[in-house]
Image: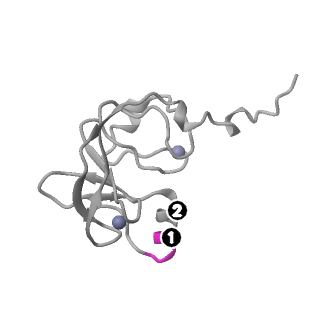
Amino acid sequence: MALFGKKDKNPAPPSAAPPRVRQLPPREALCGVCNARRPFSRCWVRTEAMIQCPNCGLAFDSPARLYRLLQPACPQCGEFLEQPGFDYGLCDNCGSKHEIVAGTKPILLPSKAQREAMDKRGRAWRPE
Ligand SMILES: [Zn+2]
Ligand SMILES: [Zn+2]
């Protein structure tokens, strides 16, 4: 029976992925979107590589290949991937995700909607 080859249009929900993070205590950090110090109540450290995209649900065939890049991203939707050993947090005020590096400015990891909005305004969103 033909299935019209649309199998990959039905990605598994991202919640199906096992937790590969460890929660961290809340902290205050400079939000790159608010451009001000904000409380970050939800912070975590990633303990293992991502095997599935949290945005589009794509399961990665070879996460190791993606993680060879300086800034790994989902090959399907461009969502930035969290890297093992790095801290992440969400701004309480705007919900933006940042990579939090001790002693330096947190790096904004823009969501798909944020990337599209920035592209429209011609603003560079890439770190560096
Ligand atoms: Zn913010
Ligand atoms: Zn994706």
Residue 121 falls within the magenta-colored stretch: yes
Residue furthest out toward the left: 103
What label sits on residue 113 in the rendered view? 2
Quarter of the figure with residue 11: top right
Q: Is mark 2 within 8 Å of ligand 2?
A: no
| Residue at (24, 58) in percent of width and height | 106
**Disc 2 crowd, CA 10 A, few/some/many (<14, 14-19, 20+):** few
- The x and y percentages for residue 75 are 50, 44
Closer to the camera in the image, 48 or 30:
30
Relative to 114, say whether 5 is above or below: above
Name the chief secondary structure element in magenta.
helix
Quarter of the figure with residue 1: top right
- The x and y percentages for residue 107 are 28, 58
Residue 96 falls within the magenta-colored stretch: no
- The x and y percentages for residue 52 are 49, 35
Q: Does residue 128 show up?
A: no
Judged from the image, the secondary structure of the residue bearing numbered disc 1 is helix
- The span from disc 2 to disc 1 (Cα, nearest Å) is 6 Å
| Residue at (22, 60) in percent of width and height | 29
What label sits on residue 61 in the rendered view? none
Q: Which residues are magenta?
A: 117-122
Q: Does residue 5 show up?
A: yes
Asked whether the beta carbons under mark 2 and mark 1 sit within 8 Å of each other, the answer is yes
Give the labeled residue for mark 1.
117
Closer to the camera in the image, 44 or 78:
44
Q: Amino acid at mark 1?
A: Ala
- The x and y percentages for residue 55 are 52, 47
Q: How many numbered dots are placed on residues in this image?
A: 2
